[in-house]
Amino acid sequence: MRAKKVLPAGVSYGIRALPPYPFYLDHAKGVKLYDADGNVYTDYWVGHGALILGHAHDNIIKAVEKQLPNGTHFGFSHEKEIKLAERIVKYVPSAEMVRYTSSGTEANMYGTRLARAYTGRNKMLKIEGGWHGGYDSLHAYVSRPYGRVESAGLNPKVTEDTMAVPYNDLEAATKIAKKEKPACIVMEPVMGAAGFLTPEPGYLEGMRELCTEVGALLIFDEVITGFRLGMGGAQGYYGVTPDLTIMGKVIGGGFPVGAFCGPEEIMELIDHNKYPDPEKRSAHGGTFTGNPITMVAGCATVDTLKDGVVHKHIDALGEKMRSGLQDIFDAAKYPASVTGVGSTFGIHFQKEKPKSAGDTAKNDIEMTKAYFRYMLERNIVYLSPTVSHSWISSPHTKEDVEEYLRVTEEFMKSYKA
């Protein structure tokens, strides 16, 4: 009741309003969550996927504690923002230069603005079901039925130049891109909110070739996959280099962050020295860009990941989870498929493995909700109740995965439609 008096629905983000009511955390460590009532949960949401090292990792805590007495926010340039940018440039194939924001939403906003400035075009092509934050021009074709108004208060003029095609449909993308000549195609190389859908062989390569052919910039939204699918993110994993990359989550080490990066030829359009005329320059700014706490936490995270040990561990657990889940569903002779790559996994209660967000309409939504409730009641948590997708982070163990599989097997034996 206290929360509802001061927060709409009693939460700071609608997806956290878990049925029948949300739990409120007291503290977290590793992959364990401790709520205000003394319950302990194993966390497969890990800060919306941002906490690849888990909650309160020692390396990050030490880095932040060292920085705190030296200032939490400067509002001026400092070396720490250079250090994180140098790490991003070193590992991300598309990155030669970086600019920071405070969220993935802002990074998508500034990144797509830069694409329009560079190409001199206004139209954008995205993927149906793709979530790129709350930026108005990309807040279209997010939920079914695609093309409907996604939010009250959205000016229809800001989305009239935004088009969308299904994921894994190169033919549809080719048809519309050749006709409309967009400034950019912005896409998640692995679709997150749709339940970790992965690209079909040749799809990303085809999108790369298409953008080159029509003179559009290929933008990979790697807010989820950046530094999670290895040091090079999805573009390193799949061997396809975009023109611009949107980043967030992992690079902040648990603190608010976003970034967009690309080659100097494109990024220099932000440089006020080279382009003093605001009509020829792509504007960018923000009070908390390059925040020193975020920068040192990000550097500590990247440095912890760079030897490959963490990725080897979480990817192995991800494969164990995905194969184990599929074995359970097959043995139960119930139509269900498992998606994901690396340390991600999604569960779809339908016979065919979905290839696009539209395909997820076939999911058994009541079973999805029942599965969520069953797991939550046994202190295993993720989001959301209607889309079962999760992350594995470094503190997760083989025993954690085996427990998740055991509880899932119990659910399959007990569930009655």
Image (spheres, grey):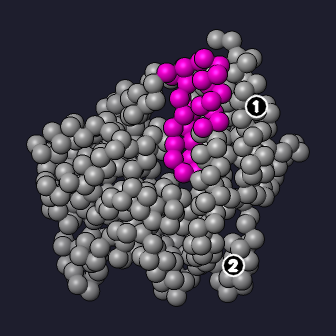
Nearer the observer: mark 1 or 2; the answer is 1
Badge 1 is on which residue?
A: 407
Q: Residue at the spot x=28%, y=64% of the render?
A: 243
Q: Is residue 80 left or right of residue 168?
A: right
Local secondary structure at mark 1: helix
Vertical position of residue 151 compared to residue 314: above or below? above
Residue 223 percent coordinates (x, y): 47, 57
Which quadrant would the C terminus be assigned to in this image?
top right
Range of residues picked out in magenta? 323-351
Mark 2 is surrounded, within 10 Å at the Cα level, by few (under 14), some (14 to 19) or many (20 or more) other residues, namely: some
Assess disc 1: are there few (<14), some (14-19) or many (≥20) residues with their C-alpha within 10 Å of its C-alpha. Answer: some
Please name the residue shown 34% across and 39% down the image.
167
The residue lying toward the viewer, choosing from 237 and 130, is 237
Q: Which of the labelled discs sits on residue 63, or is there none?
A: 2
> Would you say 378 lies left or right of 170 here?
right
- Asked if residue 25 is positioned above or below residue 169 in the image, the reply reads below
Query: Residue 166, image x and y in percent?
Result: 31, 36
Q: Is residue 160 visible?
A: no
Q: Quadrant of residue 176?
A: top left
